[in-house]
Image (tube, rainbow, N blue to C red):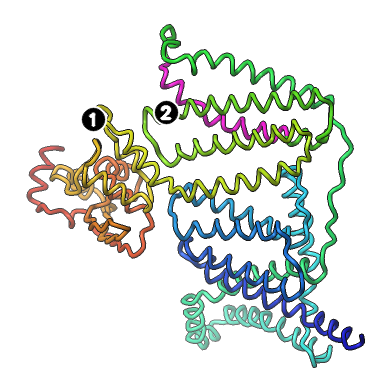
Amino acid sequence: MTAFLLSENKDMQYLPWKLFSGSLLIGLAFDVLIFHAPEFGLNVLLFELVFFGVSAGLSYHLKHKFEIRTWVAIIFSLLYAGTFAFWTSAIGLALSGFGLVIANSFFILFLLGHHNDFKHPFEVLVAHFKHTFLGAINRIDIIQHLKLPGFSSRSEAVGRGILITIPILIIFALLFVQADIVLQQQTASLLNSIRKFFEKENIVGHMIGTIFVSTIMLAIFGSAFWRKLDLKPVRELAPKFKIEATIIFSTVSALFLTFLIIQSFYLFGGKNAWDNIEGITYSEYAVNGFGELAVISILVISLILSLRYLHTEVTKKIINILEAVLVVETVLVVASAWTRLNLYVSEYGFTPARLFGFWFFITVSITLLLLLVNILRQANQADFMRQATVFIGVSMLIFTVSAPDAFSVRLNINRATTEKPMDIFPLFDSLTAEAYPLMNLVINTKTVPIKGLIEPQPAIEDYCGYFHDRRSRDDAYVIDAETRIDIERWNVRWNNYNYERLRGEKGTAELKTRNFKTWNLSRATIPYAKYSFIDVLATTPYSYTELKAVCDGAK
């Protein structure tokens, strides 16, 4: 028994050092893989593997068992991180980034021992402030327990004093050097060498980033493994706010019903409903307002969750009926927004942003149906929160993995006809690498009717704008993209000119109009692309005399 207690005390003595080592490893990984990385890709997944590997290793060593909810958060985090390594859509990766932050935040809460009994999204923020932030602050004193075995308290105090004294002496010494010209001259060579070293290696930046992240992780690990937080389940609130909820739901439902009745005559009545209305076309009405309707659906979910949080789930039947009616009306509003967006797409074609709109309406509709079931069953709202969180998390992954940039091109190919060819400039603008193979198929094989394509080699008249600009100012440049891209079956050499004026958007607009391919490729982050900034006139295949003869006559 005595040996067991001695062993346990020894483990507790070394525990701060174990947590410090794990925190330092995470801090170094963050600095190398994230903080100084030029872009996000496989490095995000590698950092997540280090983060969860260290956390799981400490948990296993300290016999801190992960609950199922903790493993779910880890799986979601790794899946989101993996999307950065395989997909490139800006909207998709923005969703993945948001999901990655949320999944990691839940993992930290579960690591601290939270029971996942959230009934409102706001409770997640409160829990992080109360447990993660304040808990970490209260555990930061773990640094004082980083004691070396075999050293007396006096020796430890001397060591701490030396560590604190070194930066103080450096600061005073630098100030004294700056205050005396003679000292500056005598130490100039040394100071320049030190300055060049720090500028080249950015040692200070690396140290600050590593120390900051390591300290945060040490405080969190201290709350999870050292002096554990005592997180108790949230107490049930006393039912209240019932009369107020009845009034709110009644009036809001009446307003929703009025809106649905009014707009149904026009939106679902077809073009014949607009025969007697002047000044607004059917397509103009259809393509306006679906953004506002999307915001309305989010506000309704927040309103219902907030009022149910106050009056509790088991309440008067009339309140449940009013909540259910409002949910059904919101689903109809979402259907209205879907119809508007569908009309917009039928007129102008698909883009990743418009695909995101369809995805959003599907996700919100299913979330509303889950909420409706929870209301009718008078079930615990925490159950809905868990179901909605998992469903929305899966939905965001599906959207990113579907490669929306490439998917939008594929849908536009299917809808292109001779009477209505694909307008490739606005539809292909800002697409990323995942869409390049299909873009190449459309542009080079011309398998579908297209319009808006301008060949890579400009005519001599296309250089007149540059010629006139060069005469008056010297700020016209071109990006000569000598880029060799090998993405799946596409290996095409692009030799186009990207004109970009440093004073305004005129040159950018001219470039978009003339050649969208160069514009898109110059904006994309393509591995191994080599760019050089040179004078635009130096790249023309025409002589100055030829340009002068043509451009002066066209001026």
Q: Is residue 343 left or right of residue 155?
A: left
Comparing 120 with 415, the one in front is 415
Name the residue rendered at 72%, 79% in the picture.
18
Query: Of the residues shown, which amino acid type is indicated by label 2?
Result: Tyr
**Is 373 situated above or below 76?**
above
Q: Position of residue 368 (x, y in %)?
A: 64, 34
- Residue extending farthest bottom: 150
Image quadrant where residue 141 sits: bottom right
Give the mark nearest the N terminus, 2 or 1.
2
Q: Which residue is mark 1?
A: 418
Name the residue rendered at 82%, 69% in the picture.
227
Can you tell which mark lies on residue 380?
Answer: none
Q: Position of residue 78 (x, y in %)?
A: 57, 60
Q: Which residues are magenta?
A: 280-304
- Residue extending farthest top: 276
Question: How many other residues sit within 10 Å of disc 1, few (<14), some (14-19) or many (≥20)?
Answer: few
Image quadrant where residue 250 sits: top right
Q: Nearer the viewer, mark 2 or mark 1?
A: 1
| Tag count | 2
**Is 341 situated above or below 229?**
above
Which structural element holds mark 1?
loop
Q: Position of residue 517 (x, y in %)?
A: 28, 48
Q: Which residue is mark 2?
A: 344
Query: Of the residues shown, which amino acid type is indicated by label 1?
Result: Thr
